[in-house]
Image: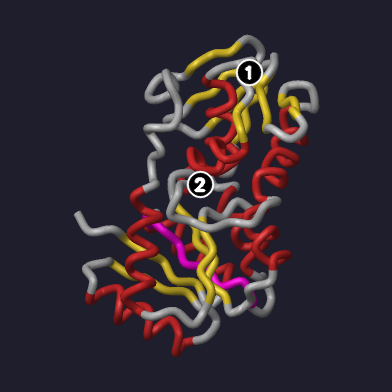
Amino acid sequence: MNNSVLVIDDEQDIRVLIKYNLEKEGFIVSEASNGADGIEIAKKNIPDLILLDVMMPGMDGIETCEKLKEIPELQSTMICFLTARGEDYSQIAGFDAGADDYITKPIKPKLLASRISAVLRRKGGGEIVDGLNGEGAKEKSITIDRERYLISKSGNEMFLPRKEFELLALLMSKPGKVFHRDSIMNNVWGTDVVVGDRTIDVHIRKLREKIGDTHIVTVKGVGYKFED
């Protein structure tokens, strides 16, 4: 079955060009010209991947991404920002919102298709966590359900953006073990994506806001570990 891609970009020429080239590579492509329409199309079609422009009038890409990540049915959908802006702060804001990758325009059609395929190969992430695939795995006060991208803390359930979930699942797979930053980066983001140095820190901060400050411990100069 061919993978489906939703392109959300306010520039029609870019949407047409991306759609034409991705369809030549076998992808099923839909499109939207703004964030609000893109969210409705995504909820209806549940694409495998969303290409999302950052700089859009009205609801920009960051806000659109945050709203997409709140929809339970889209927890397994990968999101790649597509933008002409390459500044570090834009990348940090994008990953903070829950994006899986960051592609800078302009990009050659073949390379774009290759990048999308690489991101889709990471979809599922089944290899990164021992004992957390399929059925929920319980670790004292926090329960994590990998199939539904859902965690429960003290009886309260919440959905997490994909990367936050996979980061927490990795740390919880071996409570007390210190995971080096390089290991976290390779396991959660993969070796085929380049992200900024602050990406892990941003996701750790978001997790601490949601599950509390005591569970994720910083080991200075090394990495992080999970404690219950």
Residue 76 or 46: which is nearer the viewer? 76
Q: Is 59 rendered above or below residue 10? A: above
Q: Nearer the viewer, residue 200 or 116?
A: 200
Nearest to the observer: residue 44 or residue 54: 54
Q: Which residue is drawn at 47% across and 48% down?
A: 74
Q: Dot 2: few (<14), some (14–19), or many (≥20) neighbours within 10 Å?
A: many
Point 37% across, 85% down: residue? 17
- Upstream in the sequence, badge 1 or badge 2? 1
Q: Which circle marks residue 165 in the picture?
A: none
Picture quarter containing residue 64? bottom right
Residue corresponding to mark 2: 189
Q: Residue shown at 45%/59% (left/top)?
A: 42
Q: In this view, does 181 lie to the left or right of 2?
A: right
Asked whether, in this view, residue 207 is left or right of residue 78, the answer is: right
- Numbered range of the magenta stretch: 47-55
Residue 71: percent from the left, percent from the top?
A: 54, 47
Give the residue type at disc 1. Ile
Check the image and tell me how it is coloured. Answer: secondary structure
Q: In which quarter of the image is the C terminus?
A: top right
Mark 2 element type: helix
Above or below, comparing residue 54 to residue 145 in the picture: below
Where residue 22 appears, as percent x and y from the top left, is: 30, 73
Residue 154 x %, y %: 69, 16
- What kind of element bears circle 1? strand
| Residue drawn at the location 66% of the way across and 24% of the way down | 225
Q: Residue 208: which quarter of the image?
A: top right
Q: Residue 142 carries which label?
A: 1
Task: State the image coordinates of residue 153 (x, y, percent, origin top left).
Answer: 67, 20
Marks 2 and 1: in contact by CB < 8 Å? no
Left or right of 178 in this view: 80: left
Please tell me whether mark 1 or mark 2 is closer to you in this view: 2
